[in-house]
Every structure is written in C-alpha cells, then in structure tokens.
C-alpha cells in the first residue's frame, strides 16, 4: 500500500494519484490491456484512456 499500513488490495493508495508523462502513448495490444494513459492537452482538452478489448481487437477507449 501507499500511504496505508493495512492495504486491502495489491495496490491501495490513500490519497490522490497523478498520471503524468511527456512520452508518446504506446500502441494498445493484448500485453497492455488494462493500462491507463493520461495525455495533457495543453491549452486544449486532456484525455484519460484505457487499453481494453472490445470485440476481437484491443483499443484505446476514452474514459
């Protein structure tokens, strides 16, 4: 756990979580399913996406 001494899950965070990167978002495939990705939009809109399988193909979906 982060910020807790008695976590009830493999990752439990007591407090906020910040996603931040300047890296390019990777491709979405079976090995990355479940990955969250935040894109800072600068003066435009930000994006928060998850790599998930819809039908037969993994794809990035906006949250």
Image (tube, grey):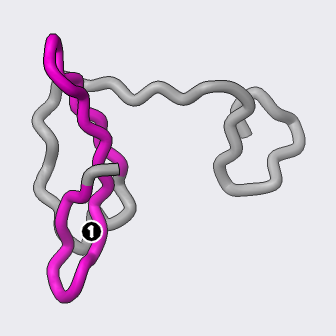
Q: Is residue 37 left or right of residue 58?
A: right
Q: Position of residue 41 (x, y in %)?
A: 17, 23
Check the image and name the residue furthest to the top. Answer: 43
Quarter where residue 43 is shown? top left
Q: Give the residues drawn in magenta, as a range.
A: 36-61
Residue at image point 18% right, 88% down: 56
Residue occupying the point 27% across, 51% down = 62
Q: Quadrant of the N terminus?
A: top right
Q: Position of residue 50 (x, y in %)?
A: 32, 55
Q: Nearer the viewer, residue 1 or 50?
A: 50
Q: Give the percent coordinates (x, y) of residue 21.
A: 26, 25
Mark 1 element type: helix
Residue 15 placement (x, y as % from top left): 69, 26
Residue 34 placement: quadrant? bottom left
Q: Is residue 45 magenta?
A: yes
Vertical side of 27 occupied by 40: above or below: above
Q: Quick check: 60 left or right of 37?
A: left
User: Could you tell me how many numbered marks the image carries?
Assistant: 1
Residue at image location 88% in from the left, 43% down from the top: 6
Q: Is residue 16 above or below residue 27?
A: above
Prevalent SS, magenta region: strand
Going by the picture, which residue comes out furthest to the bottom? 56
Residue marked by disc 1: 31
Is 58 displayed left or right of 24 in the figure? right
């Amino acid at each position: 756990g982060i910020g807790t001494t008695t976590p009830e899950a493999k990752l439990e965070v007591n407090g906020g979580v910040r996603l931040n990167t300047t890296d390019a978002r990777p491709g979405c495939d079976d090995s990355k399913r479940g990955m969250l990705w935040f894109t800072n939009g600068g003066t435009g809109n930000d994006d928060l996406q998850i790599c998930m399988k819809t039908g037969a193909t993994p794809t990035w979906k906006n949250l």
